[in-house]
Image (tube, rainbow, N blue to C red):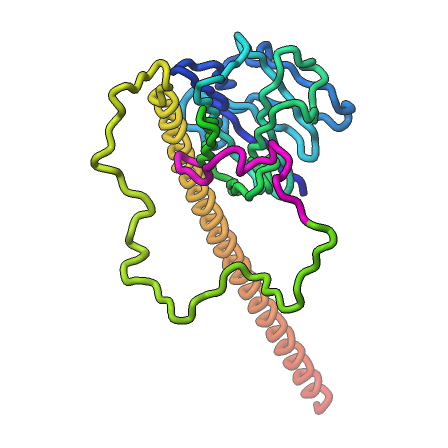
């Protein structure tokens, strides 16, 4: 069964360069459709419609999102920035919240940075568009040389992508970095410097394993208690650092922290709903069991009454036969 691709989105996209928010969408007002254009690049029978809903686990009054309404359908929306995006010499931040309210079996979703002259009513799988794969079994990998994991549970998660001016990148889930590194080593922007020799064959005694375990090696004691990273007590912001020119992460971090707080509240409400549903099911099961016991008891009483009636009938029959026998003797 196909599942919904993008289930819930709120504060889905915020790009920050020089502390400037280029785009922000919460989908919680009645006019959200006037800002977005639905694409007709697929036949109508294959296209689904986004619906504005209150998330099942939302906790703030008036907080809404858009949700795919049908399984096994294509969905495409686009909205224009107020002005063209130019991230030259700046860090670019993209963040969004997504939740699958049902189990994800198959699907994929994308956030694309489109050219200013894009035909919004007909855009789709155009390879010229910058693509950020955001959810699905192989989510956010978009030709990435390594696998970038994504969550496939039914909790809300905050995904963030940072494209840095030093040509490196960072991918975060719920505020935690899961992948980072140089762009040129992670995506095939340029042809490979080396290619395989089709005439070269592997030696017969070649071992494919790049590494083999050392049988004498042992994990040091307390190894698992050592944190992966520790703060540098001597680290300080450079004296020549300029928040306006070099980029200021405070606004983006504040946005990310706010959305993370939302996911935590949603997780708490989800657990509350699950506990209530579990308690309700247990109560219904107990009620059914009690009803069954009462029915069984009533059946037993009815069966006993029938047996007593049959015994009375047999006794009466025997008495009649005895009386008849006595009369015959006389």
Position above or below: 55 against 86? below
Residue at image coords 40%, 24%: 60
Magenta part of the chain:
173-196
Residue 278 in the image: state x and y as whole percent: 46, 47
Residue 204: x and y in percent read 67, 67
* The C terminus sits in image quarter: bottom right
For the question of whether residue 4 can be seen, the reply is: no
Q: Position of residue 122 (x, y in %)?
A: 72, 17
- The quarter of the picture where residue 42 lies is top right
- Image quadrant where residue 309 sits: bottom right
Can residue 279 be seen in the rendering of this structure? yes
View extreme (bottom): residue: 329
Q: Relative to 297, say whether 323 is above or below.
A: below
Up/down of 143 relative to 77, above or below:
below
Where is residue 180, by image quadrant?
A: top left
Reply above or below: 297 against 157: below
Looking at the image, which residue sits at the far left?
233
The quadrant of the picture occupied by the N terminus is top right
Tally of marks: 0
């Amino acid at each position: 069964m196909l599942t919904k691709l993008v289930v819930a989105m709120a504060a889905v996209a915020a790009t920050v360069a020089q502390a400037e928010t280029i785009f922000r969408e919460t989908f919680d007002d009645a006019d959200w459709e006037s800002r977005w254009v639905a694409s007709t690049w697929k036949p109508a029978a294959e296209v689904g419609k986004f619906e504005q809903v209150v998330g099942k686990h939302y906790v703030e009054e008036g907080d809404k999102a858009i949700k795919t309404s049908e399984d096994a359908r294509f969905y495409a929306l686009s909205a224009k920035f107020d002005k063209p995006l130019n991230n030259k010499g700046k860090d670019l931040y993209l963040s969004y919240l997504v939740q699958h309210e049902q189990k994800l079996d198959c699907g994929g979703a994308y956030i694309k940075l489109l050219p200013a002259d894009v035909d919004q009513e007909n855009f789709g799988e155009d390879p010229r568009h910058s693509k950020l794969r955001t959810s699905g079994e192989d989510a956010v990998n978009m030709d990435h040389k390594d696998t970038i994991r994504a969550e496939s549970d039914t909790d809300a998660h905050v995904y963030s992508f940072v494209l840095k001016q030093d040509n490196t990148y960072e991918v975060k889930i719920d505020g935690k970095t899961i992948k980072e590194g140089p762009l040129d080593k992670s995506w095939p922007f340029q042809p490979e410097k080396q290619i395989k020799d089709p005439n070269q064959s592997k030696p017969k005694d070649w071992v494919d394993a790049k590494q083999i375990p050392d049988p004498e090696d042992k994990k040091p004691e307390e190894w698992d208690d050592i944190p992966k990273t520790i703060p540098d007590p001597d680290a300080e912001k450079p004296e020549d650092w300029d928040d306006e020119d070099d980029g200021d992460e405070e606004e983006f971090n504040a946005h990310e922290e706010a959305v993370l707080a939302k996911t935590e509240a949603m997780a708490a409400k989800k657990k509350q709903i699950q506990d209530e549903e579990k308690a309700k099911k247990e109560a219904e099961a107990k009620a059914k069991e009690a009803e069954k016991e009462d029915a069984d008891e009533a059946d037993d009483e009815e069966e006993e009454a029938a047996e007593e009636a049959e015994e009375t009938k047999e006794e009466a029959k025997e008495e009649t036969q005895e009386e008849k026998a006595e009369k015959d003797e006389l």
